[in-house]
Image (cartoon, helix red, strand yellow):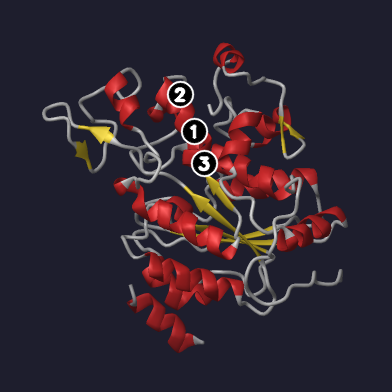
Amino acid sequence: GREASVHCLLVAAVGLDEASQRSTGGSTKHTAGNVDIQLLRSLWPQSESLLNASQLDSGVELAGADDRLACVRAALTRRTPVSIGAIGGSITAGSNYAVRSGATHLYHHKLLAALDAIHPVRNGHSLSNGGVPGTGPTYMEHCVHDHMPRRADLLLVEYAVNTDRNPASFERLLRTLLLLPHAPALVVVNAHRWRAVRPGDGRTDKCWNSKWPVDMAANATQRAAQSWGSAGQRDEINSDEDAIADLCRHYNVPLVSMRGALLGAVRSGALSIPAFMRDCKHPAGEGHTYLAQLLLHRLLSPPALTQAPPARGHPHKCRRAP
């Protein structure tokens, strides 16, 4: 109600060029979720380079349970309107200070555009941008109902760079979403905090941006600094991202990952970080394209073998067609 809303307000490449794709075994004539990339390029701004088939597969870090996503695919097939909600921080909101609901470069808007083109319905599918800049799950676990559609069919959850060493709050949020009575499909969307090595002392800096004194595209030291942790070790800069992945495995929730898709290309020098990022943790339009492509791939391409058990939460049955 109104009081809850007031309370919540107070709580607070990858696509490579043709030569580099050939060198990694990719192809410029691949599909994403059985969608031709030429269609995606016609729909999405900032889409000259797209993920190849290998990167798409690597970027689905966890296929997770498919029962709820199967219901979304069934609704799309029978041309039933689908309601999408996206919650997260500034990456989802579209800026550091305000929610840019109409920003077409954002990953969830690009997913919506693709679904409208591939599975058109009268008046289009719907999208609610519930991102809140500068906040994490510590806020959203209390106020999520004010930031998502009342009966969303698909919820996208993006907090890998906003969890602030408090994964317990993300788990509580995830449990809340899994236990919603109408059992929407969930996909966790992990962006990634890319490292920057300080030129003076070789230490890892908190962040970099366009004024960083080292060329992130050409400097091999910067490429080599990008990591996912060795076997048995954690990547301390991205411990929140690792914790979210662990929770997704525990609850068997689908997870798509920028790190999973792009780390190899970045470390090899085939892809430059500034080509798809505005700074160390905020994607540029190209970065949002890659996230949208991963989401489309997971939604429209079910895993070869259903991964049991289903996501934890209410027993799920697809809603009836209207």
Q: Give the residue at x 75% y 49%.
A: 305
- Marks 2 and 1, the one that precedes in the sequence: 1
- Using the numbered discs, state the Cα–Cα distance from disc 1 to disc 3 in whole angstroms: 13 Å
Local crowd size for mark 1, using a 10 Å CA cut-off: few (<14), some (14–19), many (≥20): many
Residue 122 occupies quadrant:
bottom right
Q: Amino acid at mark 1?
A: Leu
Quadrant containing the C terminus is bottom right
Local crowd size for mark 3, using a 10 Å CA cut-off: few (<14), some (14–19), many (≥20): many
Q: Position of residue 50 (x, y in %)?
A: 59, 29
Answer above or below: position of 130 versus 268. Answer: below
Task: From the image, tell me which residue sits under label 1.
Answer: 262
Query: Could you say which is closer to the camera, residue 101 or residue 72?
Result: 72
Query: Could you say which is closer to the camera, residue 101 or residue 146?
Result: 146
Q: Position of residue 233 (x, y in %)?
A: 35, 45
Q: How many marks?
A: 3
- Using the numbered discs, state the Cα–Cα distance from disc 2 to disc 1 in whole angstroms: 8 Å
Q: Amino acid at mark 3?
A: His
Answer above or below: position of 116 versus 263. Answer: below
- Using the numbered discs, state the Cα–Cα distance from disc 2 to disc 3 in whole angstroms: 15 Å
Callout 2 touching callout 1 (CB < 8 Å): yes
Residue 278 occupies quadrant:
top left
Q: Amino acid at mark 2?
A: Leu
Task: From the image, tell me which residue sits under label 2.
Answer: 271
Q: Position of residue 83 (x, y in %)?
A: 69, 63
* Label of residue 222 in the image: none
Local crowd size for mark 2, using a 10 Å CA cut-off: few (<14), some (14–19), many (≥20): many
Q: Position of residue 105 (x, y in %)?
A: 53, 42
Callout 1 touching callout 3 (CB < 8 Å): no
Q: Give the residue at x 72% y 22%.
A: 29
Q: Is residue 168 left or right of residue 181?
A: left
Task: Identify the element where label 2 is drawn.
Answer: loop
Task: Identify the element where label 1 is drawn.
Answer: helix
